[in-house]
Image (cartoon, grey):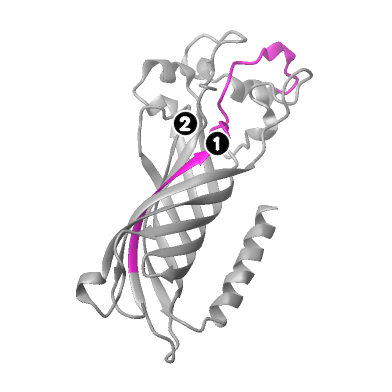
Amino acid sequence: MFKKIVAGITVFVIVITFNAKAQKYELGLFGGFSGYKGDLSQFNYMRFTDPAFGLVFRTNFNPRSALKVSITHGKVQANDATSGIPDQEYRNLRFQSVINELSVQYEFNFFSLNPFIEDERFSPYLSAGLSVFNFDPKAENGQRLQPLGTEGQGLEGNPDRYKLTDLAIPLGVGLKYRMSDRWNLFSELGYRITFTDYIDDVSGYYVDLNSVPSTLTKTYADRSPEAGYPANLPGNQRGDLRKNDTYMFAVVGISFSFVSSHCPSF
């Protein structure tokens, strides 16, 4: 489903780009870092761990507002063993996950942008919108965790396994600089409010391992014994189900404006 949505948006961007009649359309690329905050990283705010990159298509309605569509690829990870927090070291869980995101956001520039007026080439901006993203938490050896049902998902009387594609609310703050009528620089810090607590495969309580038929599930459901600690009792807290996970991007990029010689610029 996610791939179909991305393909549809990509075709839309290409068609619009080649039919652009004024410079209000931009196509660009960006790169930077991605990070995550969740059950394995509750006290590390805005910690970026892995590279991220993507493409952006922007339609400028006027010098102070725009609509952008972006596709971003990143990765997030965390490890209890390196947290320095005793309770997390006891728990000894870890994960890594690729994040693929398709986002549509409205941008508001604080100042008008005009490449032909020196004082109007630069502006901070805010953005917000809606994203669809895909994730797939794995152990350090690449073992996929969602199919295992590490918190009893899929067992009789328990919830089904969580979805790997979900929605998020993207919020961003950034800076834009119009180098010329064609080229633009930008930087952005983006924060994603999600509706899932399973980006890290951790949310609720330890499952009764006697009810779990899979040896793999037993191995990854409770990893405290690997660190030399006693096994956790069924029903003990494994994660913090009061809060959903979040992820972030910090990027810089460059975009190209499509200009028509007979159209006024802004």
Q: Residues within 10 Å of mark 1 (few under 14, many from 20)?
A: many
**Which amino acid type is marked by label 2?**
Gly
Q: Up-down: is 98 above or below 84?
A: below
Q: Secondary structure at mark 2?
A: loop
Q: Foreground residue, 232 or 116?
A: 116
Q: Position of residue 40 (x, y in %)?
A: 46, 28
Q: Position of residue 128 (x, y in %)?
A: 46, 51
**Which amino acid type is marked by label 1?**
Ile
Q: Residues within 10 Å of mark 2 (few under 14, many from 20)?
A: many
Taking the magenta stretch, the answer to whether it contains residue 156 is no
Farthest bottom residue?
262
Q: Foreground residue, 44 or 125?
A: 125
Q: Residue at x 38, y 28 (%)?
A: 82
Q: CA distance from mark 1 to mark 2?
A: 8 Å
Q: Give the residue at mark 2.
A: 38
The answer to whether mark 1 and mark 2 are in CB contact below 8 A is yes
Q: Magenta part of the protein: which range? A: 185-214
Q: Give the residue at mark 1.
A: 199
Q: Up-down: is 146 above or below 80?
A: below
